[in-house]
């Protein structure tokens, strides 16, 4: 998928993009997690149950998203757009691409993990029709 007017394209992430994606996450102010490393990102890129997608402008990675399907529910992680390239439709295009893939996999519900201390992110997901589920609390344990 591409947007010729703004000069960006959406494509699958490749192994050679790993360091650029990790740097994008740092620049986009994503809170670092235990899986934010080259090995885990490479594993996601090559996994059949995951779809790692990037946005590119002039051969530079400016956006990313990870969609996964476990056979039960779709999940979205690490939707990030470089601050200089926000508000151009890149994030919406990334989400649409992952939602299309999840639909093809059979997902009927998608959960997006959104950092609550990033109000712009919360507003973005709500604008796309993702509602905050106040019934759920996420419990995490690093292994």
Image: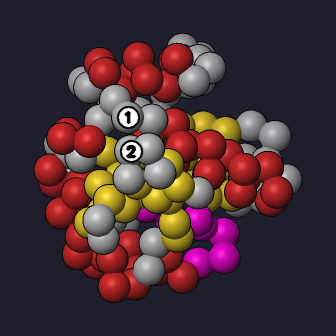
Q: Which residue was labeled with disc 1?
A: 88
Q: Secondary structure at mark 2?
A: loop
Q: Could one spot residue 133 in this view of the protein?
A: no
Residue name at image x 52 percent, y 18 percent? 126
Tag 1 and tag 2, C-beta contact below 8 Å: yes
> Whole-percent x and y of residue 137?
49, 27
> Whole-percent x and y of residue 94?
51, 48
- Looking at the image, is 120 positioned above or below residue 107? above
Q: Secondary structure at mark 1?
A: loop
> Whole-percent x and y of residue 98?
62, 52
State left or right for residue 23 relative to residue 47: left
Q: Mark 1 or 2 closer to N-term? A: 2
**Colour mapping:** secondary structure
Looking at the rendered image, the quarter that the N terminus falls into is bottom right
- In 3D space, how far apart are the residues under numbered discs 1 and 2 (Cα atoms)? 7 Å
As for residue 52 lying within the magenta part, the answer is yes
Mark 1 vs mark 2: give the one in front.
Answer: 2
Q: Which residues are magenta?
A: 47-54
> Looking at the rendered structure, which numbered label has been put on residue 132?
none
State left or right for residue 55 relative to residue 135: left
- Looking at the image, is 38 positioned above or below residue 7? below
Residue name at image x 37 percent, y 34 percent? 88
Looking at the rendered image, the quarter that the C terminus falls into is bottom left
Q: Residues within 10 Å of mark 1 (few under 14, many from 20)?
A: few
> Looking at the rendered structure, which numbered label has been put on residue 6?
2
Give the total of numbered labels: 2
As for residue 94 lying within the magenta part, the answer is no
Residue name at image x 40 percent, y 84 percent? 15
Q: Could one spot residue 61 in this view of the protein?
A: yes
- Looking at the image, is 137 positioned above or below residue 34? above
State the predominant SS element of the stretch in magenta. Answer: strand
Residue name at image x 46 percent, y 58 percent? 9
């Amino acid at each position: 998928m591409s947007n010729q007017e703004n000069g960006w394209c959406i494509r699958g992430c490749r192994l050679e993009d790993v360091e650029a994606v990790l740097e994008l996450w740092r620049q986009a102010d994503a809170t670092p997690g235990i899986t934010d490393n080259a090995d885990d990102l490479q594993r996601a890129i090559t996994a059949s149950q995951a779809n790692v997608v990037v946005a590119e402008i002039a051969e530079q990675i400016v956006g990313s998203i990870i969609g996964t399907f476990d056979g039960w529910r779709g999940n979205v992680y690490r939707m990030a757009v470089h601050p200089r390239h926000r508000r151009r439709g890149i994030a919406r295009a990334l989400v649409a691409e992952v939602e299309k893939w999840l639909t093809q996999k059979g997902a009927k519900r998608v959960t997006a993990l959104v950092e609550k201390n990033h109000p712009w992110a919360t507003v973005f997901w709500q604008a796309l029709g993702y509602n905050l589920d106040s019934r759920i609390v996420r419990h995490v344990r690093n292994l």
